[in-house]
């Protein structure tokens, strides 16, 4: 349904979502997205998650997402100091919330220590990989995953092992303490 400027309470052309559809799934269909739409959309997104849930997702997923999409950024030794400084800052932010969890709710701020663990895990795995194969891991092409033996099986194993260890161990420790 399209409301025109004379009927709209704000005075702009806008599409309004049906009453049964929540506003979060709504984005205007027109190519002209107004600042008011963006403001209202961001207000609804911000109310979806509490700060501790944002800390949980950010702490757990920053390094694995960098690992998947910016592979060379994590392997660069010059960037290692910057990444460890950011991880230590996130750990310090977690320390400020050690005694402040809501009663009866797990302290999700502890997941801000995960980037520090994940970067240390990556550096340890890289040390083992480099000492065993005398090279850096390469990004194996996906098309030849099952087709042929191209000598990149250890690279694929490195990636899978890192992703599993970086995600499962923190969640497993958390589940062990809070179950």
Image (spheres, helix red, strand yellow):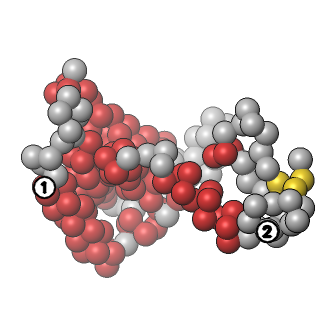
Return the residue nearer the eye: 97 or 125: 97
Residue 161 in view: no
Residue 112: % across, % down: 26, 52
User: 160 left or right of 83?
Assistant: right
Residue 175: % across, % down: 25, 27
Residue 1: % across, % down: 89, 47
Q: Identify the residue shown where x is 74% and y is 65%.
A: 10
Return the residue nearer the eye: 98 or 147: 98
Q: Nearer the viewer, mark 1 or mark 2?
A: 2
The secondary element bearing badge 1 is classed as helix
User: 61 left or right of 16?
Assistant: left
Return the residue nearer the eye: 71 or 140: 71
User: 96 left or right of 59?
Assistant: left
Furthest toward the left, the residue is: 99
Residue 28: % across, % down: 78, 57
Q: Which mark is residue 11?
A: 2
* Residue annotated with mark 1: 95
Q: Tell me which numbered mark, 1 or 2, is placed earlier along the sequence.
A: 2
Q: Which mark is residue 58?
A: none
What is the quadrant of residue 9 in the picture? bottom right
Q: Identify the residue shown where x is 90% and y is 61%.
A: 4
Residue 38 in view: yes
Give the vertical position of 147 relative to 140 (above or below).
Answer: above
Q: Identify the residue shown where x is 57% and y is 59%.
A: 42
In three-dimensional space, the C-alpha distance between marks 1 and 2, rounded to whole angstroms, equals 48 Å
Quadrant placement of the C terminus: top left
Label 2 CA crowd tier, 10 Å (few <14, some 14–19, many 20+): few
Label 1 CA crowd tier, 10 Å (few <14, some 14–19, many 20+): some
Decide: marks 1, 2 in contact (CB < 8 A)?
Answer: no
Query: How many marks overall?
Result: 2
The secondary element bearing badge 2 is classed as loop
């Amino acid at each position: 349904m399209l409301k025109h400027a004379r009927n709209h309470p704000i005075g702009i052309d806008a599409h309004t979502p049906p009453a049964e559809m929540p506003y979060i799934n709504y984005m205007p269909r027109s190519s002209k997205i107004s600042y008011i739409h963006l403001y209202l959309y961001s207000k609804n997104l911000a109310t979806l998650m509490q700060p501790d849930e944002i800390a949980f997702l950010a702490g757990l997923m920053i390094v694995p997402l960098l690992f998947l999409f910016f592979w060379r950024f994590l392997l660069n030794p010059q960037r290692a100091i910057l990444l460890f400084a950011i991880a230590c800052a996130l750990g310090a932010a977690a320390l400020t919330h050690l005694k402040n969890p809501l009663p009866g709710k797990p302290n999700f701020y502890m997941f801000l220590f995960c980037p520090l663990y994940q970067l240390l895990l990556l550096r340890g795995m890289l040390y083992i990989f480099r000492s065993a194969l005398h090279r850096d891991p390469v990004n194996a092409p996906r098309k030849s995953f099952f087709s042929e033996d191209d000598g990149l099986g250890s690279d694929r194993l490195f990636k899978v092992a890192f992703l599993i260890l970086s995600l499962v161990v923190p969640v497993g420790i958390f589940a062990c303490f809070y179950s």
